[in-house]
Every structure is written in C-alpha cells, then in structure tokens.
Amino acid sequence: MLIVNSFDAIPKMPSPIAITIGSFDGLHLGHRAIFKRLRALAPTGTTAIITFSNHPSEVLSPNNPTKLIYTPEQKVKTLKTLDIDLCVLLSFTKETASNTYDQFLLALKEKLPFDYLVLGYNAVLGKGRTGTPSALQSFAKKHEFSLEYLPAVKVDGEPVSSGRIRKLLADGKTNESAKLLDNHEI
C-alpha cells in the first residue's frame, strides 16, 4: 500500500478507481466490508482510502475530543495489512473542517479521478455535514461517478460502529470489542 499525506502527492493510479472516505477509527468489521466492496468494484484497478491521521473531533470539539480506539500508529499498521492500494492520510485541520463536501470531492477528483465512492450507512461529508446521501447522489450524477452506501454490518443484532466499540471499551468489555474489530489487539 502506498501512503501519501496530501492530494498533491497522489500519483497517477490505474483505473477503475474505487475510494472511500472516513475516520476509520478501529478499522472494524463495518469498515472492512467497505474495503472489500472497493476491491470488488476495482479488482484490477485502484482501491483507495481517504482518512485522517487525527480524529476530526480534535479540531471540531477540542475541549472534548473523541477517545480513539487505535493510535495513529496502530491505524497505519493495520491499514498496511489490508488489500488497499492507496491511503491518503490527511491531517484534519481547521481548513479541512471549512471545506464543503463538494469542494473536498472536486479537489480529490482532480488528483484521483475516481469512478466509485463507497460509504458506510451513516456517513455524511463536509462542513456542516451537508454531504448527505441525497446531496452526494446529485453530486455523483453530475460528476459521473457511482455512489454506494453499504448497509450496517450487524453483530448480535446491533450495527458495528466505532461509537459502539468505544462504549464497550469504556465498560471494560474487551472481548466483545475485539469481536467487532475482528482482531485481538485491544
């Protein structure tokens, strides 16, 4: 996997290009379903993750940032074990937070002309969380890429999410959290 730290550092990549965007804290079963879908969409092309080296809450809620499941080092180490071709690992800054979803996606598409965008069931993008499913669907049609939201992966009848894992960890339920992470690193 190639890891770059800016859009400008993205080299020309083989098509088709399937991407996903998110914090991906913990790289849990839901995230892994997205990554698997990327590979299915681009079996001989490029799969790419656009993610952050820090959690957006560090900028958006500096007095109460989200407690991370993985350190940035653990996240990168785990990403390297996955079947992903490119990781764009950005620092989430005030400037990043000020970008609308369309500004962010247009800047990305200029450097990485993606064909597919795959997101988790509850994903929203951009300043003010205006990159909703309906807004993104219109944007995708206009800019000629396919947008897909995957349904929640459920374990024990509940959606797998980073928030659920954080709560389990806070409650000392490490075995249950490890089951959702598909590993035993906790």
Image (cartoon, rainbow, N blue to C red):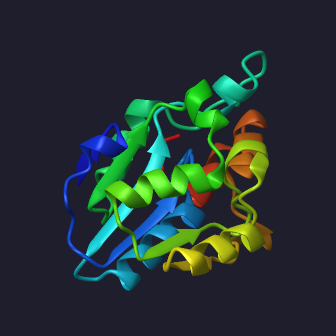
Q: Is residue 115 left or right of residue 168?
A: left
Vertical side of 64 occupied by 34: above or below: below
Quadrant for the N terminus in the image: bottom left
Point 70% across, 69% down: residue: 121
Q: Is residue 66 left or right of residue 73?
A: right
Depth order, front residue of 39/162: 39
Point 78% across, 21% down: residue: 64
The answer to whether residue 38 is visible is yes
Vertical side of 147 occupied by 178: above or below: above
Dividing the picture into quadrants, the one containing residue 42 is: bottom left
Count of labels shown? Answer: 0
Dividing the picture into quadrants, the one containing residue 84 is: bottom left
The answer to whether residue 183 is visible is no
Point 58% across, 77% down: residue: 142
Point 28% across, 83% down: residue: 43
Vertical side of 82 occupied by 60: above or below: above
The spot of residue 168 in percent (x, y) is 74, 44
The spot of residue 54 in percent (x, y) is 53, 30
Depth order, front residue of 104/157: 104
Q: Is residue 44 left or right of residue 113?
A: left
The spot of residue 78 in percent (x, y) is 37, 48
The spot of residue 26 in percent (x, y) is 54, 47
Q: Residue furthest top?
A: 63
